[in-house]
Image (spheres, grey):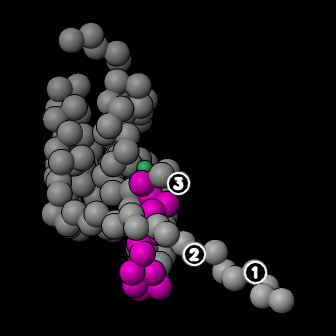
């Protein structure tokens, strides 16, 4: 009469946590720079210390890692096999903090764009168009 046991989750996917990996941010900075938009880096006086700040346009960009900030993509939905509760709590807190900070910026008249790490894997089809749209930049070939 053995009933159904809880399915064994064999997710041996070690969540590869790369701390201090600034590659996505570097990609974004270099693209925006090539588009000719001027920005400041990490303005600490603004909520959340946005990664790129465009004071004249009153726009900010955050570059977020998909795992930490719980992006709705396959990288963001990774469930760590160990310490699941700890990570879930930490990531939820991160998400809530993101929301608060972005709302504070919006309330203060800023426009906010979150660039997700996974976008930087598809610069041509995703990242560049999003940046151009957000920054009101013309398509500039080359
Ligand atoms: Zn993502």
Mark 1 vs mark 3, CA separation in Å: 31 Å
- Is 98 placed above or below 85 here? above
Residue positioned 36% across, 32% down in the render: 122
Mark 2 vs mark 1, CA separation in Å: 11 Å
- Is 14 placed above or below 26 here? below
What span is colored magenta in the figure?
75-86
Q: Does the magenta stretch include residue 77?
A: yes
Residue positioned 75% across, 80% down in the render: 4
Q: Circle 1 is placed at which residue position?
A: 4
Residue positioned 41% across, 72% down in the render: 80
| Furthest residue toward front | 1
Q: In which quarter of the image is the C terminus?
A: top left
In the image shown, does 120 or 13 lie closer to the viewer? 13
Q: Quadrant of residue 50?
A: bottom left
Some atom of ligand 1 lies within 8 Å of the CB belonging to the residue at label 3: yes
Residue 79 screen position, x and y as percent: 46, 69
Q: Which of marks 3 and 2 is nearer the N terminus?
A: 2
**Of labels 1 and 3, the one closer to you:** 1
Q: Are marks 3 and 2 in contact (CB under 8 Å)?
A: no
Some atom of ligand 1 lies within 8 Å of the CB belonging to the residue at label 2: no
Graded by Cα atoms within 10 Å as few (under 14), some (14 to 19) or many (20 or more), the crowding at tag 3 reads: few
Q: Circle 2 is placed at which residue position?
A: 8
* Chief secondary structure of the magenta portion: loop
On the question of residue 93 being in view, the answer is: no
Q: Which of marks 1 and 3 is nearer the N terminus?
A: 1
Residue 28 screen position, x and y as percent: 24, 40
Q: Could you say whether the residue bearing mark 1 is in a helix, strand or loop?
A: loop
Q: Circle 3 is placed at which residue position?
A: 72
């Amino acid at each position: 009469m053995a009933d159904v046991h809880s399915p064994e989750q064999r997710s041996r996917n070690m969540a590869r946590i790369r701390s201090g990996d600034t590659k996505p941010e570097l990609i974004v900075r270099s693209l925006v720079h090539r588009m000719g938009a001027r920005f400041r880096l990490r303005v600490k006086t603004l909520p959340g210390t946005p990664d790129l700040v465009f004071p004249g346009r009153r726009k900010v960009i955050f570059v977020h890692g998909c795992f930490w900030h719980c992006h709705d993509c396959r990288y963001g939905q990774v469930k760590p096999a160990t310490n699941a509760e700890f990570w879930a709590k930490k990531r939820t807190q991160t998400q809530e903090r993101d929301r608060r900070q972005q709302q504070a910026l919006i309330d203060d008249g800023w426009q906010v764009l979150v660039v997700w790490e996974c976008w930087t894997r598809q610069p041509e089809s995703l990242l560049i168009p999003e940046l151009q749209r957000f920054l009101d930049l013309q398509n500039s070939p080359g």
